[in-house]
Image (tube, rainbow, N blue to C red):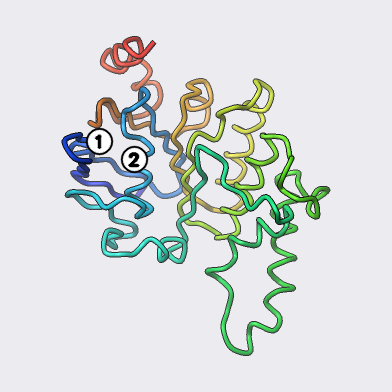
Amino acid sequence: MPALLTVRNLTIRFGGITALNDVSFDVAEGHITGLIGPNGAGKTTCFNCITRLYQPTSGEVLFKGEDLLRCVPQQIAGKRIARTFQNVALFDHMSVLENALVGYHTRFPGGLAAWGAETAATREAMDVLDRLGLAGIANRPAHGLPFGLRKNVELARALMVRPELLLLDEPAAGLSHDEVSALGDTIKRIARDFSTTVLMVEHHMALVMRISDHIVVLASGKTLADGPPDAVRANPAVIEAYLGAV
């Protein structure tokens, strides 16, 4: 499969600390790629570079051949790249539906076409919410929802971008065993039904190994391993890095 996203020699320093050191990997189009590693390995920092929240010291981030490092952060969603966050970031005073509609803003047309766009956007948002089991609470405020539902609302917002690349930052964090199992099925269904490529940061190894087509391992800001799940699982360097983190 061709690479949809290419990260090459990515390095970022914060003062005297090197958070990423010459990191390189590809994300194949149509695949689910797991990005794993011990705490502090640089996984979320890598996401923040891809989505332009951080400015790398050096390196390249190519999306369909275009250098994302030439973009400003507010242009990223317009490239059909969406993400979720470790700490769920919703607008608590808004309804579930309104939170989902926030993801539509980059696709909202200007001029006369805007007259009918709100109805179409609402219809689409309700479809996305229904696919995630949220349609029944569409009009409830986000505030006070259980954590698992809040994560699904954030996912719905990301899907309203209609992303070609979906970045999931620890989607299983804080979920129960049953919720994690259901999440794996949901991610696989999303990748198929929305024709989106997924790059997922996750510590839940059973989930990563079950749904990933390819896995990239970071440790101490460097690329430690890169390959199919079975090869990564058996890699002595990966085993040592995780044992050292326990």
Drawn side of residue 159 relative to residue 137, left or right: left
94 to 31, vertically: above or below: below
Residue placed under numbered mark 1 in the picture = 19
- Residue 232, numbered label: none
Q: Residue at x 34, y 55 (%)?
A: 52
Comparing 117 with 209, the one in front is 117
Report the Cα–Cα distance between label 1 and label 2: 7 Å
Instruction: Specify the quadrant of the image occupied by residue 88.
Output: top right
Drawn side of residue 226 relative to residue 135, left or right: left
The tag earlier along the polypeptide, 1 or 2, is: 1
Q: Amino acid at mark 1?
A: Ala
- Where does residue 72 sit, x and y in percent of width and height? 34, 64
Drawn side of residue 91 relative to residue 225, left or right: right
Comparing 70 with 30, the one in front is 70
Circle 2 Cα neighbour tier, 10 Å, few/some/many (<14 / 14–19 / ≥20): some
Residues at circles 1 and 2 in contact by the CB criterion of under 8 Å: yes
- Where does residue 14 sit, x and y in percent of width and height? 22, 41
